[in-house]
Image: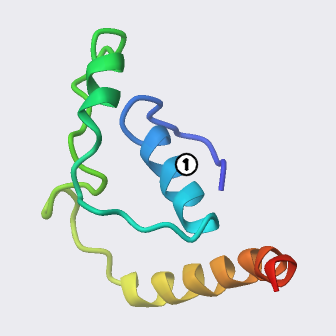
Amino acid sequence: MGGGGYDIWRVVPRAWSLIWLEMTEQTLSSNELPLTWIDKWQNASPVPLPTTWSDPDGMYQPIPRKAEIEEKNEHIVQKLLYPLRQERN
């Protein structure tokens, strides 16, 4: 996490918010971003802000190794969350 190439208006807020939700074991009640966030930041943003937590289907070309990458990412997430979950038990 935290590599270069950030899109500070469309990617960073969603990515870090999703990480926080995962770390605090919260789930999304909808795919829609809060309108209060969009209303607060749209005028400052040089680009249209997203309205959903996830990117629209078909936005990117399919990734041939997607399943392998997802599996490795899930393994890393579990390793990172292990100490946090141990503290709670």
Q: Is residue 58 left or right of residue 87?
A: left
Q: Is residue 48 left or right of residue 87?
A: left
Residue drawn at 29 percent across, 39 percent down: 34
Q: Is residue 89 left or right of residue 32?
A: right
| Above/below status of 83 relative to 41 | below
| Above/below status of 20 relative to 38 | below
Residue drawn at 24 percent across, 55 percent down: 55
Image x and y of residue 29, in percent: 29, 63
Q: Is residue 7 left or right of residue 53?
A: right
Tag count: 1
Residue drawn at 30 percent across, 28 percent down: 36
Residue identified by numbered label 1: 16
Image x and y of residue 64, in percent: 32, 82
Outermost top residue: 43
Quadrant where the C terminus sits is bottom right
Outermost front residue: 89
Q: Secondary structure at mark 1?
A: helix
Give residue 41's quadrant in the image: top left
Q: Nearer the viewer, residue 52 or 85?
A: 85
Image x and y of residue 47, in percent: 26, 21
Residue drawn at 55 percent across, 67 percent down: 22
| Above/below status of 16 relative to 23 | above
Give residue 24's quadrant in the image: bottom right
Amino acid type, residue under disc 1 in the picture: Trp
